[in-house]
């Protein structure tokens, strides 16, 4: 039988493996500072679990790329972090951050498994998924035990199954507006949480960035995140539902550099991309017209912010270029 691992990477496999390598090198840098400054003995093993997972991924991918004669991405190195810098984030925020990262990792690994075909790469992403699920379990259990886990709102059980009978189910601006569905509540709650986590990161990054242009970019992002938090929280409050807490107090007053501007810009850009995906999913899961239009109006704002961030990264040669297809027109012309 043919050894299917000898088949070269498909475009999907190149995309997922390349992205995984970049993300894991960034993760090791971010967590190295967390690990250096952690004070809670219960939080330390959780950080170590996440760190070991990323290091395992990097080792596997480095070996795989070498065997395939595939250029190893530059990603991020020890030059992008100063582990001995003063503490920037609290242990409570660290747990919340890791919980959110595990959700993103589960989504990315699940998506990769839907595209890759080589058995060795399939096995790799199954391990990545298993690690992400394990990290989610560890963070959830510890936050529940420490009383820092913020549950989504509770609602009453329905009396019986039912079907939508009138178009007013979709209405959201005029006349009688129906209550939020549990799916809509979940989307709103999640978007408040993710924006709050992003805002806290941006605050810490803005305090410690040494580049004026980057600092101004982060300040702008802080305002956008707060605006979105307020919008989503207000919708929940109108329904007498609680909005999740924010994490501003989880940032210390340190202004000493912890991460390189390159790493911080990459991290925020990745979170912006995840936010755009969340808003798209929220639109599809929110039949009430006012909610769908609200998400649709916010996506261009953060897309423009993401573009401005990419331009800054390009200007400073911080944006690593992903693999691309051959330019056949140039090859034909001999350019």
Image (spheres, rainbow, N blue to C red):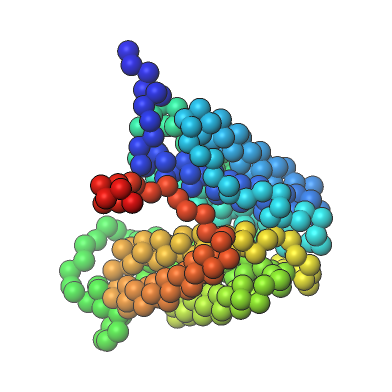
Check the image and report above or below for 172 versus 303.
below
Q: Nearer the viewer, residue 31 or 38?
A: 31
Q: Position of residue 134 (x, y in %)?
A: 58, 40
Please report the residue visible at 30 percent of the width from the left and 48 percent of the height from the top. 334
Q: Is residue 246 visible?
A: no
Check the image and report above or below for 208 versus 270.
below
Q: Position of residue 221 (x, y in %)?
A: 55, 75
Q: Nearer the viewer, residue 114 or 260?
A: 260
Check the image and report above or below for 69 versus 327.
above
Q: Position of residue 299 (x, y in %)?
A: 39, 72
Query: Which picture quadrant has residue 80?
Result: bottom right
Q: Nearer the viewer, residue 294 or 235?
A: 294
Q: Is residue 315 visible?
A: yes
Q: Is residue 79 left or right of residue 177?
A: right
Q: Position of residue 280 (x, y in %)?
A: 36, 64
Please report the residue visible at 57 percent of the width from the left and 35 percent of the height from the top. 62
Question: Which residue is outermost to the top?
Answer: 1
Q: Is residue 134 left or right of residue 38?
A: left
Query: Which picture quadrant has residue 249?
Result: bottom right
Please report the residue visible at 30 percent of the width from the left and 84 percent of the height from the top. 173
Q: Is residue 282 left or right of residue 225?
A: left
Q: Give the quarter of the figure containing the N terminus.
A: top left
Q: Is residue 234 left or right of residue 136?
A: left
């Amino acid at each position: 039988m043919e050894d299917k691992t000898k088949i070269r990477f498909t475009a999907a496999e190149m995309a997922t493996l390349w992205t995984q390598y970049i993300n894991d090198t960034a993760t090791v840098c971010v967590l190295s500072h967390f690990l250096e400054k952690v004070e809670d003995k219960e939080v330390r093993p959780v950080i170590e679990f996440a760190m070991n997972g990323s290091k395992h991924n990097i080792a596997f991918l480095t070996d795989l790329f070498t065997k395939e004669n595939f250029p190893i991405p530059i990603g991020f190195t020890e030059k992008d972090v100063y582990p001995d810098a003063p503490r920037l984030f609290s242990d409570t925020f660290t747990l919340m951050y890791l919980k959110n990262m595990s959700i993103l990792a589960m989504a990315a690994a699940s998506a990769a498994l839907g595209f890759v075909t080589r058995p060795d790469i399939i096995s790799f992403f199954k391990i990545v998924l298993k690690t992400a699920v394990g990290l989610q379990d560890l963070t959830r259990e510890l936050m529940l035990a420490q009383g820092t886990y913020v549950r989504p709102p509770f609602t009453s059980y329905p009396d019986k199954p039912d079907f939508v009978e009138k178009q007013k189910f979709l209405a959201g601006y005029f006349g009688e507006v129906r209550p939020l569905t549990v799916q809509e509540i979940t989307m709103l709650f999640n978007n408040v949480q993710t924006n709050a986590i992003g805002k806290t990161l941006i605050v810490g990054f803005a305090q410690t960035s040494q580049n004026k242009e980057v600092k101004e970019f982060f300040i702008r992002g802080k305002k956008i995140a707060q605006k979105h938090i307020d919008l989503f929280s207000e919708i929940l409050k109108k329904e007498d539902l609680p909005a999740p807490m924010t994490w501003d107090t989880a940032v210390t007053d340190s202004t000493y550099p912890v991460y390189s501007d390159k790493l911080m810009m990459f991290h925020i850009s990745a979170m912006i991309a995840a936010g755009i995906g969340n808003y798209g999913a929220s639109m599809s899961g929110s039949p009430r017209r006012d909610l769908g239009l609200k998400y649709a109006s916010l996506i261009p704002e953060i897309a423009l912010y993401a573009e401005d961030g990419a331009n800054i990264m390009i200007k400073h040669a911080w944006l690593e270029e992903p693999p691309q297809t051959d330019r056949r027109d140039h090859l034909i012309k001999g350019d």
